Image (tube, rainbow, N blue to C red):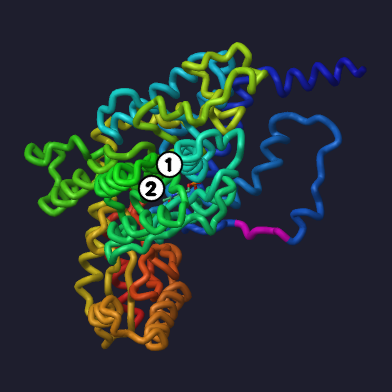
Amino acid sequence: MDQKLYEQIVKNFFTCDPAAITEIFREFIMAVQAEGTLPPSAHMAQNYETAQANPEIHVLPGNLKDARDAVFPYFWGTDSWSSKLHLENVKGPANYASLVGALACLLKNPNLCTDTYSQRSNELEIKAVTALANLLFYHTDDPWGVFTMGGTISNLYGAKIGIEKVAPGAMRNGLSGGQVAGIVSEAAHYSNQSVAGWLGLGTKNLHAIPTDEGLSMRLDLLAAKLEELHGQGVKVAFVTATFGTTDGSGIDDVAAIRGILSDFANRHGVAAPQLHVDAAVGWVLSFLTEYRTDANELGFTERLLELVKQAQEKASGLRAADSITIDFHKMGWGHYPGSAFLVNRRQDLRYLSRSVEETPYFCEADGRRDPALFTLECSRPALGPYTVMASLNGMGLTGWQLLVARALGLADELKQRLEALEYCKVLNLDAVGPSVVWWVLPKGRDAKEIYRRVLAGEMAPEKFEGYAAEIRRLFEKREKGMDPAVDARLSYTTNVGHKANGLALPGWKAVFFNPMTDEKVIERLMFSIEELL
Ligand SMILES: *Cc1c(COP(=O)(O)O)cnc(C)c1O
């Protein structure tokens, strides 16, 4: 064996050289700063044509700069969404407290599967999930939770607990004993479809309850669906309510759903379905729970105080949930993956647990605290706990309140300004959240009247198709004429989450996700709409 070469590898790649590492890190940071002076867009075009044609691996060992060079073109070619002009989606810049947490985590690289592999990092996870559970369930007695690979997987945990509740032993026996179903709203995230498919429930057994015009699940139709399924001998394993729909910030009434489920279970003598709440986007409203609107120490405007009160009222519904999905990598402005699955009562995790005999790798695992005994994942990164605790305690509750309130305030400002134009109609006027979905029609059209006729069922589908085409055409016209240096980037959705008499409502969409976005961006956006027509 070439001992010299071997030693060189150990020296270059397994020995920490602070100077070499910080120098490369400095270079990356300078590239990020340079990027900040450019308009938001991909600075380098993708090259899929030959991405697979040249999958070369260097032959000879190099050094850390070779590692840098291997990724740099793609790093430079990737937008970090730090521009204040990004309003397209629930994607924003990660905060730098999160970066500090992430770097600390990566330097130690703990594995959260058991506490022997992670030591104090599992303790940090318990701290993080308890802090989040106290915020969301509001000082609940015995919560628990784990960080997962993403909101999709957190939703999967909730659904799986429900399946085990109504079909005991499914983990071992599969879904053999009768039909099992789940329920969501028609505005729910598509990840629930993935969950139903992957859990073996089958996507056709995931029932979507229509929403009302406020984008919330229709409670009368939920109650009817429960009865209908029960009448057919189908067991309902879970109802996944959405707290903040991805497009329009719609919120299901969790407390009312709890009432319906309890009533249903009592009347029929069956196990209540798991009430899981997908709060991947909307969970941050909970930061406002303890804001004293009477003292108003942060000096919010009257209008903003009104929004904060609405947020408090909505967030109080979360206390009725059995389990919740939150994504820190969305409105927590954290790094991926930062998703947590939280349960209101720790004992519910027993539905997921396996015995130590079934997990022989972890024969010394302690069922009281080793997540590997109930997690879907085996190895789990500790990025979630590190980025979340760094972000929570870096900014503090007050910092979070300011950030969340500001996003709500900007969304509200855009809503009010759009709604004041005759040819525009905001489709989520009463939703409390960071997103705005709306129509822009040609000048001269009465957008509110068209909307009213759609809701009242007075609009023929062919006629509506014509209006929808106009809404889309105007969106595309703005895209074509955009000045990337000043015009905000928006997105377009073909279905904002409500079907009015069978008609899916399309909409322009803006999400106030970037803390740097300001009134000037809104000003220019309004100008770009008025200029279009
Ligand atoms: C994004 C999103 C998800 C999926 O979360 P991932 O972390 O992307 O897997 C689930 N539900 C809602 C409401 C979402 O917005």
Which segment did they paint magenta? 44-48
- Name the amino acid, label 1: Asp
* Residue 47 is covered by the magenta coloring: yes
Q: Secondary structure at mark 2?
A: loop
Q: Residue at horizontal 47%, vertical 57%?
A: 40
Label whose residue precedes the other's in the sequence (2 or 1): 2
- Point out residue 138 in the picture as x, y percentages from the top left corner: 25, 32
Task: Give x and y (percent) for residue 481.
Answer: 44, 75
Q: Is mark 1 within 8 Å of ligand 1?
A: yes
Residue farthest along the top direction in this orientation = 364
Left or right of 153, for residue 388: left
The residue that label 2 is drawn on is: 281
- The answer to whether residue 339 shows anywhere in this view is no
Point 61% across, 36% down: residue? 173
Task: From the image, give the main secondary structure of the stretch colored magenta.
Answer: loop
Instruction: Identify which residue is drawn at 29% across, 33% down.
Output: 135
Q: Position of residue 468 (x, y in %)?
A: 40, 80
Dot 2 amino acid type: Val
Q: Residues within 10 Å of mark 1 (few under 14, many from 20)?
A: many
Q: Are circles 2 and 1 on residues that touch, CB within 8 Å?
A: yes
Instruction: Look at mark 1 in the image and give the residue it sits on.
Output: 327
Q: Whole-percent x and y of residue 152?
A: 50, 45
Q: Quadrant of residue 117?
A: top right
In the displayed structure, 273 sits above or below 218; it is above
Asked whether 95 or 365 is in front, the reply is: 365
Query: What residue is drawn where x is 61% and y is 33%?
Result: 172
Q: Nearer the viewer, residue 271 or 517?
A: 271
